[in-house]
Amino acid sequence: MAMSNIRQLRDKTPESEKVTLNLGFVDLGRIDLLVQEGFYSNRSDFIRTAIRNQLDSHGEVVARSIERHTM
């Protein structure tokens, strides 16, 4: 086997990072109901969507902050 055919298995940085959070049973139950009803494919889908919605709702503030920090 030629050495040119060997490459690292992890040559790219991941596009996402794992985050752990604690939620109460009531919130998890409500999320699970929405998943069961087909609104979301799984808990992670719901949480990612909720985070994106929050980031979008604060988009102007985030943009101004980025602008201040890049000056």
Image: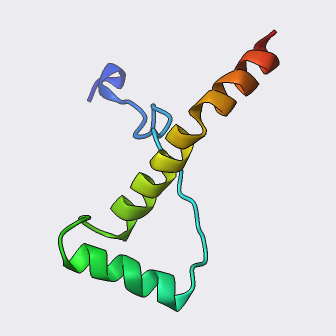
* Residue drawn at x 44%, y 62% as measured from the top left: 47
Q: Is residue 6 left or right of residue 22?
A: left
* Residue drawn at x 64%, y 24% as measured from the top left: 63
* Nearer to us in this view, 17 or 60: 60
Outermost residue toward the top in this view:
71
Q: Is residue 19 left or right of residue 49?
A: right
Q: Is residue 31 left or right of residue 33?
A: right
58 w.r.t. 63: above or below: below
* Residue drawn at x 49%, y 81% as measured from the top left: 27
Q: Position of residue 40 (x, y in %)?
A: 26, 64
Outermost residue toward the left in this view:
38
Q: Position of residue 69 (x, y in %)?
A: 80, 20
Classify the position of the N terminus by image quarter.
top left
Classify the position of the C terminus by image quarter.
top right
55 w.r.t. 12: above or below: below
50 w.r.t. 36: above or below: above
Q: Is residue 13 left or right of residue 41?
A: right
14 w.r.t. 3: above or below: below
Task: Look at the image and name its color scheme.
Answer: rainbow
Q: Position of residue 66 (x, y in %)?
A: 71, 23
* Nearer to us in this view, 65 or 21: 65
Q: Tell how many labels.
A: 0
> Residue 48 is drawn in which quadrant?
bottom left
* Residue drawn at x 57%, y 86% as measured from the top left: 24
Q: Position of residue 30 (x, y in %)?
A: 39, 82
